[in-house]
Image: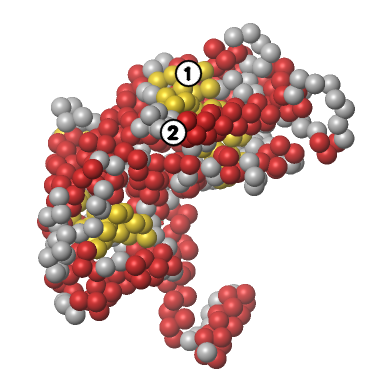
């Protein structure tokens, strides 16, 4: 394929019989394979690499001209050619006194105008000045969105809920995403329409799932109040979108729209107005700290040499595991319950970005690309799927994510619980790497009590979980995804793979409405007919 790729292949052959246990015996391994920047430490010492592989991965980085690729991303070149646009999520976190001119326009000025408008919305809601149709202050906010318009804010709100300032206490945030209405139907039973505000979050403002939930929400408001649609939408709906005219056509008043730009991908959008629920949770101050944390990672990404560059190294390790170690499952294991939604968030970020088999030049990718990601809060997953990690037949790479400090100033019991979580995180990484050798005894065990080990993992250690360190962590993964895409030659910023299903669902909804089942493959027609019969019988 290329000189560095061939060398890595030869190294994979050379290391085939070497166990991680042996690699971990080399001197200074932890010091030479752990790297710190922007509130985080990345420990790669439990990866199946030696110093030669490390150097060859860096050679691959040079060979693929990652420096130019990073500059192209951060300066607004068209890195998303199938949609003919840049991907400038990094511009959303640039400080107000900076500048990024793309095609003659300073994007930073526009970003900060939107942040100022967001600030106004947050202040109005927090101070009780945003009032519903009876004049009562809004106390419940429901974010209606899906994919990137849901997972980013949901994950971040959950992670940062303890950073809630006093003025945010009176406002509860809810998330509704699923098109089947399950979440909304339960919520509507509890909420008071007089004090509920809906945030309609949709980059395209055309996603059926979101519009279906929005339509049920406005019907509920109309039925409860007896008032007209227009007035209710004006008082009870905010729109966050890159298609403001569509939001206006739906009925949202211009002054209630937070606009963002088509150069912000859906799964990269929590830094834009899509982050409104985050700002309502943490206050604008917390939201700005989140942006600053991500910006610190952007700066590190832009300037650090590759041998210390966290996103580049995280990406290269993934390439090594996927393309040279034949590992195609990736577990995301946070040892902090506040990061419960991080696995789901990263599933979209990575798999919707890099789940591609066609390269930018239209040819089929000659190597494997994005693995299957999944995950769960680590301590809970220990009691669920770790059995497979330790004794299954699948090779799996894992990311352990954990803060060093937590519960400062809280009870001794909680402090102890954090130590317990840390001990378990370290124990699992150790056992996955070493297997039986993690226990320093010579006891004979039957085969079913043996641990092969040699499962690679990375540890991402946060000093402590704050808006800034979370911002940095998310930006780390965003940039990792980009670097891998560059190496594979694919476009991480489109998602054509989700379009066909949407079109076919449109045909099927027509068939369901019309009671017809013909014109499809046998399996689909058969199921349609069965469903229609069951619906008629009732
Ligand atoms: O269908 C996939 C997708 O386009 C995601 O990329 C996106 O995050 C989600 O749908 C929601 O899209 P929108 O924000 O336009 O409603």
Q: Closer to the observer: label 1 or label 2?
A: 2
Residue reaching furthest bottom? Answer: 537
Asked if one can make out residue 403 in the rendered structure from this viewpoint, the answer is no
Q: Earlier in the sequence, mark 1 or mark 2?
A: 1
Q: Residue at x 27, y 75 (%)?
A: 219
Q: Judge the density around disc 1: few (<14), some (14-19), many (≥20) Cα neighbours within 10 Å.
A: some
Residue 3 versus residue 352: which sits nearer the camera?
Answer: 352
Q: Is residue 236 visible?
A: yes
Q: Position of residue 504 (x, y in %)?
A: 47, 69
Residue 74 placement: quadrant:
top left
Q: Quadrant of residue 526?
A: bottom right
118, 164: nearer the viewer: 164
Residue depicted at x 68% and y 17%:
23
Viewed as shown, does residue 392 lie left or right of 126? right
Left or right placement of residue 25 versus residue 28 in this view:
right
Q: Quadrant of residue 91 in the image?
A: top left
Contact, mark 1 vs mark 2 (Cβ under 8 Å): no
Q: Position of residue 441 (x, y in %)?
A: 80, 21
Q: Residue at x 40, y 28 (%)?
A: 408
Secondary structure type for disc 1:
strand
Name the quarter where the N terminus is drawn.
top right
Q: CA distance from mark 1 to mark 2?
A: 32 Å
Relative to 19, residue 364 above or below: below
Q: Where does label 2 land, which residue?
A: 411
Tell me the element at label 2: loop
Residue 320: numbered disc: none
From the Cβ of disc 2, is ligand 1 less than 8 Å away? no
Look at mark 1 in the image and give the residue it sits on: 35
Residue 112: image location, x then y, percent: 16, 38
């Amino acid at each position: 394929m290329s000189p560095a790729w061939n060398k890595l292949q030869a190294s994979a052959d050379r290391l085939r019989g070497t166990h991680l246990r042996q690699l971990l015996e080399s001197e200074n391994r932890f010091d030479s394979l752990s790297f710190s920047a922007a509130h985080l430490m990345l420990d790669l010492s439990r990866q199946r690499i030696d110093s030669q592989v490390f150097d060859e991965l860096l050679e691959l980085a040079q060979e693929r001209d990652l420096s130019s690729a990073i500059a192209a991303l951060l300066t607004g070149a068209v890195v998303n050619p199938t949609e003919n646009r840049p991907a400038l999520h990094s511009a959303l976190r640039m400080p107000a006194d900076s500048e990024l001119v793309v095609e003659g326009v300073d994007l930073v000025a526009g970003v900060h105008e939107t942040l100022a408008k967001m600030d106004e919305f947050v202040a109005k809601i927090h101070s009780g000045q945003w009032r519903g149709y009876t004049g009562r202050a809004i106390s419940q906010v429901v974010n209606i969105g899906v994919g990137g318009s849901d997972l980013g804010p949901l994950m971040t709100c959950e992670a940062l809920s303890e950073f809630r300032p006093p003025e945010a206490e009176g406002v509860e945030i809810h998330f509704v995403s699923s098109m089947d209405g399950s979440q909304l139907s339960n919520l509507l039973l509890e909420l008071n329409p007089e004090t509920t505000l809906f945030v309609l979050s949709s980059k395209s403002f055309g996603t059926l799932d979101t519009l279906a939930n929005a339509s049920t929400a406005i019907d509920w408001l109309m039925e409860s109040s007896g008032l007209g649609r227009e007035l209710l939408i004006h008082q009870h709906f905010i729109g966050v979108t890159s298609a403001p005219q569509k939001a206006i056509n739906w009925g949202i008043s211009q002054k209630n729209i937070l606009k963002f730009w088509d150069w912000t991908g859906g799964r990269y959008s929590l830094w834009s107005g899509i982050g409104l629920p985050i700002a309502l949770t943490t206050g604008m101050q917390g939201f700005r700290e989140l942006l600053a944390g991500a910006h610190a990672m952007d700066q590190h990404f832009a300037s650090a040499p590759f041998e210390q560059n966290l996103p580049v190294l995280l990406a290269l390790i993934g390439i090594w595991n996927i393309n040279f170690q034949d590992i195609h499952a990736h577990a995301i294991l946070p040892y902090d319950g506040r990061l419960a939604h991080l696995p789901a968030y990263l599933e979209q970020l990575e798999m919707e970005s890099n789940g591609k088999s066609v390269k930018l030049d239209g040819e089929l990718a000659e190597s494997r690309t994005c693995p299957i990601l999944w995950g769960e809060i680590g301590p809970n997953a220990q009691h669920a799927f770790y059995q497979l990690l330790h004794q299954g037949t699948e090779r799996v790479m894992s990311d352990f994510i954990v803060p060093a400090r937590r519960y400062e100033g809280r009870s001794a019991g909680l402090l102890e619980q954090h130590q317990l979580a840390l001990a378990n995180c370290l124990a699992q990484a150790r056992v996955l790497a070493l297997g039986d050798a993690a226990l320093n005894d010579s006891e004979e065990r039957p085969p079913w009590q043996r641990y092969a080990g040699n499962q690679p993992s990375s540890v991402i250690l946060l000093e402590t979980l704050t808006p800034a360190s979370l911002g940095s962590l998310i930006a780390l993964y965003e940039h990792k995804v980009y670097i891998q895409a560059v190496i594979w030659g694919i476009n991480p910023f489109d998602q054509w793979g989700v379009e066909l299903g949407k079109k076919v669902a449109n045909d099927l909804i027509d068939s369901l409405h019309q009671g017809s089942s013909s014109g499809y493959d046998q399996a689909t027609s058969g199921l349609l007919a069965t469903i229609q019969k069951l619906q008629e019988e009732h």
